[in-house]
């Protein structure tokens, strides 16, 4: 997978930097034009590809740590050791998002894990199982809180990587900010001066912005000193001079200025909540998962972490709980409602991931976004739940990934029961709305929407929902006994095995069982008798009265032609008999436009039908049997 991903981004030599977050690889490329989003999306295991924040983001789900490890192993050594690009790309906002991602991503999982531990300690203390004054509590709290207490040290290291500074010198500067004698200096009210110059002292414990600016300045000083100092003394004199001058100057200028900036950001968040807690929660809860789709949630994460550092708690993170719960509830409803076994296989584990771990990318890219309605319902439900959370007046005492098991972070603040109403309510609301209004089709609907997300089967801009199309026969009717046994060739030409089709989405078999056909004539006929569920110029889905669902996809990537050279003969909802014309296509014009005319014939719900056997490759005439469907046997069922 790592090799295929690197090939898709233009090869190892095109990678300037690679990082990762919970579920996505984040590439900064030397030449963006060399990357093929289409090829990346066809890779087995890639959920989606997003361009945002000056990065190419490849969403691979929970396997991202293993994939990144392999990617880094395959990169040139100088690239794999660097976690930051030589220069930022894109507009100011994109560069800010990329910066925040590079600074916080490397230790965010550890921050989330220790935050979960803090949530557990809060819960144990609240129910009386742990005395906060006991030595046991002190020891456990020290382990859980150490990362946040010494946050400047962690940021010093990642900032050094980002700005190409000496990370160990950066740690020395951060250590000075947290040095015990410095943290207590001036607390007795005595004036603090340096060489007679007054110094405004402030606490740098858990601070965010000061050390980032200090390391940024350090990076420029290092480069200048290495140019002007002789090589024989540069190695030890550069760090000595930087600590000598930069550290006291930072305490006098950078530290106080950036501390006031941090406080200003935190005060702005408080002002927003004071203005209208419900509106603030509604906006954050409704947009949080949309930001995740584009990888722009890092901008909000920076503000949230600054809240913890400045105020000791966070308002903004709590509406995220409603947003996560809502998308999870929608996916749970899809799992129960859909009849497509492939969609069930994705929706089940993805729902569990969202519920327990707060990881929603598998939900978003594998279930809700392909089906569209569940995603929109999730956004609306998240907004409603966020508004309730805003009204509750609760705050989070520790940074934790929003999920059901980390809700104790809000214990002891505001109206905690009302906070839980917002979280659970968002989940239930999204579940109910999706159950009744969000999954309006059969397996064909889910499969068509899912494949459309990969630009392989049908265009997702068209509504292929079969809910608006009356079924030929109810599944419980006696017509189910007369099963479809043959799928006919829709065109004359030469058939080839499915795995020989030059399109990985089809060739992998993940979309169904079938074959490819290199056509010699341009009239496409219905391969089965049934009702047309999806009628796009280049692709036609038909459902028979016994539930067999067949897709005829004319050409590869022909969705980009937007109907040019195709003359459809049917519309969605039409009843067709095997052999009826579906569409006429000018094959020569399609080829001249640079497209492969290989046509794919698939039984999309083959997993539910028993044996589905494509015929051997060879010459066929339109109307010949090319796929045989046998009744399920006990072996098939098992």
Image: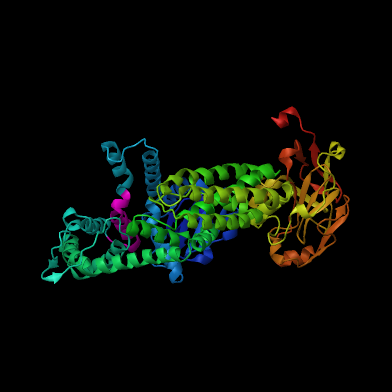
How far across and down, in percent of the image, does residue 347 sit? 61, 45
Q: Nearer the viewer, residue 463 or 410?
A: 410
Question: Residue 562 at x, y = what percent?
Answer: 72, 66
Q: Nearer the viewer, residue 638 or 434?
A: 434
- Image quadrant for the C terminus? top right
Q: Give x and y (percent) for residue 245.
A: 17, 67
Q: Residue furthest front?
A: 415
Question: Within the magenta stretch, is there residue 591?
Answer: no
- Find residue 523 and report its image quarter: bottom right
Relative placement, left or right, of 559 versus 61 is right
Magenta extent: 147-165
Residue at x 32%, y 51% (from the top left corner): 148
Q: Residue at x 40, y 61 (%)?
A: 303
Residue at the left extreme of this rendering: 196
- Foreground residue among 480 and 280: 280
Q: Is residue 46 visible?
A: no
Q: Is residue 151 magenta?
A: yes
Residue 531's x, y, as percent?
83, 51
State the image quarter where residue 16 is shown: bottom left
Q: How many marks?
A: 0
Specify the color scheme.
rainbow
Q: Is residue 354 left or right of residue 118?
A: right
């Amino acid at each position: 997978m790592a090799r295929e991903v690197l090939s898709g981004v233009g090869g190892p030599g095109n990678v300037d930097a690679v990082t990762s977050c919970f579920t996505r690889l984040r590439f900064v490329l030397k030449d963006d034009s060399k990357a093929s989003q289409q090829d990346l999306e066809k890779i087995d295991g890639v959920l989606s590809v997003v361009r945002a924040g000056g990065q190419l983001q490849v969403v691979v789900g929970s396997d991202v740590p293993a994939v990144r490890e392999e990617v880094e192993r395959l990169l040139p050594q100088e690239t794999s050791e660097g976690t930051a690009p030589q220069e930022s790309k894109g507009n100011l906002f994109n560069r800010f998002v990329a910066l925040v991602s590079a600074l916080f991503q490397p230790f965010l999982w550890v921050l989330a894990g220790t935050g979960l531990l803090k949530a557990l300690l809060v819960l144990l203390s609240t129910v009386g199982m742990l005395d906060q004054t006991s030595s046991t509590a002190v020891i456990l709290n020290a382990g859980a809180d150490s990362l946040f207490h010494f946050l400047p040290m962690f940021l010093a290291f990642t900032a050094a990587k980002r700005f190409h500074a000496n990370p160990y010198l950066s740690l020395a500067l951060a250590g000075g900010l947290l040095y015990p004698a410095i943290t207590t200096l001036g607390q007795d009210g005595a004036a603090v001066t340096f060489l007679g110059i007054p110094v405004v002292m402030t606490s740098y414990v858990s601070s965010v912005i000061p050390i980032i600016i200090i390391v940024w300045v350090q990076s420029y000083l290092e480069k200048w000193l290495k140019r002007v100092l002789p090589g024989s003394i540069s190695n030890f004199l550069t760090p000595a001079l930087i600590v000598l001058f930069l550290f006291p100057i930072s305490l006098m200028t950078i530290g106080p200025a950036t501390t006031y900036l941090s406080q200003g950001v935190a005060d702005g968040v408080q002002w927003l909540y004071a203005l209208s807690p419900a509106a603030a929660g509604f906006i954050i809860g409704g947009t949080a998962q949309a930001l995740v789709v584009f990888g722009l949630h890092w901008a909000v994460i920076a503000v949230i972490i600054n809240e913890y550092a400045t105020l000791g708690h966070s308002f903004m993170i709590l509406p995220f709980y409603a947003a996560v719960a809502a998308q999870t509830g929608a996916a749970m409803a899809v799992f129960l409602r859909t009849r497509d076994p492939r969609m069930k296989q994705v929706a089940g584990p993805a729902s569990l991931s969202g519920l327990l771990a707060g990881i929603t990318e598998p939900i978003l890219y594998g279930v809700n976004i392909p089906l569209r309605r569940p995603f929109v319902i999730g956004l609306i439900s998240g907004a409603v739940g966020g508004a309730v959370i805003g009204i509750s007046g609760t705050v989070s005492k520790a940074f934790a990934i929003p999920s059901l098991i980390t809700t104790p972070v809000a214990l002891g603040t505001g109206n905690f029961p009302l906070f839980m109403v917002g979280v659970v309510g968002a989940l239930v609301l999204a579940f109910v709305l999706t159950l009744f209004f969000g999954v309006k089709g059969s397996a064909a609907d889910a499969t068509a929407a899912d494949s459309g997300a990969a630009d392989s089967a049908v265009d997702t801009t068209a509504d292929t929902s079969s809910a608006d199309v009356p079924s030929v026969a109810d599944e419980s009717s006696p017509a189910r006994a007369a099963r479809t046994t043959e799928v006919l060739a829709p065109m004359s030409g030469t058939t080839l095995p499915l795995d020989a089709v030059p399109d990985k989405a089809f060739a992998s078999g993940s979309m169904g069982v079938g074959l490819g056909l290199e056509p010699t004539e341009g009239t496409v006929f219905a391969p089965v008798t049934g009702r047309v569920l999806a009628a796009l110029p280049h692709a036609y889905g038909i459902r028979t009265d016994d539930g067999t669902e067949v897709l005829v996809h004319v050409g590869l990537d022909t969705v980009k032609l937007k109907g040019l050279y195709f003359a459809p003969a049917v519309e969605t909802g039409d009843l067709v008999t095997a052999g009826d014309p579906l569409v006429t296509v000018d094959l020569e014009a399609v080829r001249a436009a640079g497209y492969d005319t290989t046509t794919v014939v698939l039984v999309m719900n083959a997993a539910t039908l028993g044996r589905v056997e494509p015929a051997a490759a060879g010459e066929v005439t339109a109307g010949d049997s090319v796929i045989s469907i046998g009744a399920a046997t006990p072996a098939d069922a098992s």
